[in-house]
Amino acid sequence: MDKQELRSRFLALRRALGVEERRKADAAICRNIRKMSCFRATGHVAVYATDGTEPDLSALWNEEGKRFYFPRYVAERKEYELVGVDDPESGLIRAKFGLLEPRPELPAAPAGILAQMLFLVPAVACDRHGVRLGRGGGFYDRMLAREGGAVVAVVYGCQMADDLPQEPHDRKVGFAVTEEEILEF
C-alpha cells in the first residue's frame, strides 16, 4: 500500500472509534504520557489541540511545572512555529484547517527553549520502528528537522502498524504512546 492508501485506512480506523471509547482512550494516553520519564523531566512541552479525531491531550495542559507550546501556521514561510500558551482557553483561536492555534499576537518560542522541549505530536499512524505517518503536508517533519528535543507520536492503538514506508525526509520519532502501551525506539 502507498502512503495515501495507508492514510485513508488509518484515518478511517480512527474515525470509527466511538465517543466513550475515545474518551477512555484519551484518559489512558494522558496517564501513559505522565508515566514517561522524558515528560516528567521537562518543563517545556510542545503539544497540539486535537482536530476532534486525534487523541485529546487537554487533560495535560494544566500540569504543574510545565509550559505548553502549540503550533501556529506561518503562511509566508509555509511552516509551523511553536508558541507558549499560558491559558489555552483564551490563548487559542480557530485558524488554518479549522484547528486551534495560538493567537497571532503571542510571541513565538525562543530558539533556546526548543532543544529542551518534549514534542507530543499527532500522527495518522506509527510503526514499531519509530516511523510516523503524517497527513502528507510534511509540516511536522520540517518543524522537527529544525528542533532537537525528544519526539513522541501520540496515537490510538488502532493506528499502530508493524511497518510503514519511510522516505529520506521523514523524521523518525523516539517514542509512541497509545492507550495500551509506551514504546521507545
Image (cartoon, grey):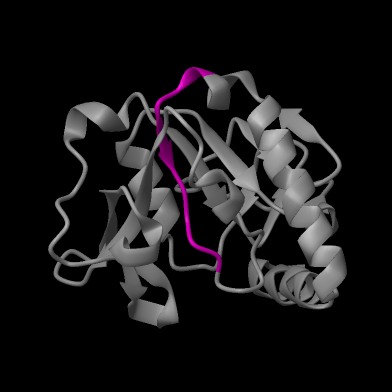
Segment tinted magenta in the rendering? 41-50
Displayed quadrant of residue 38: top right
Where's residue 131, x and y in %?
A: 64, 44
Where's residue 140, x and y in %?
A: 43, 53
Residue 38 on the magenta span: no
Viewport quadrant of the C terminus: top right
What residue do we see at 58% from left, 38% from top? 152
Residue 49 on the magenta span: yes
What residue do we see at 82% from left, 36% from top? 181
Displayed quadrant of residue 184: top right
Where's residue 65, x and y in %?
A: 42, 27
> Left or right: where does residue 86 sit relative to residue 110?
right
Q: Is residue 161 visible?
A: yes
Which is nearer the eye, 71 or 65? 65
Vertical placement of 112 versus 74: above or below?
A: above
Where's residue 104, x and y in %?
A: 17, 67
Vertical placement of 81 versus 40: above or below?
A: below
Labels in figure, total:
0
What residue do we see at 65% from left, 66% from top? 3
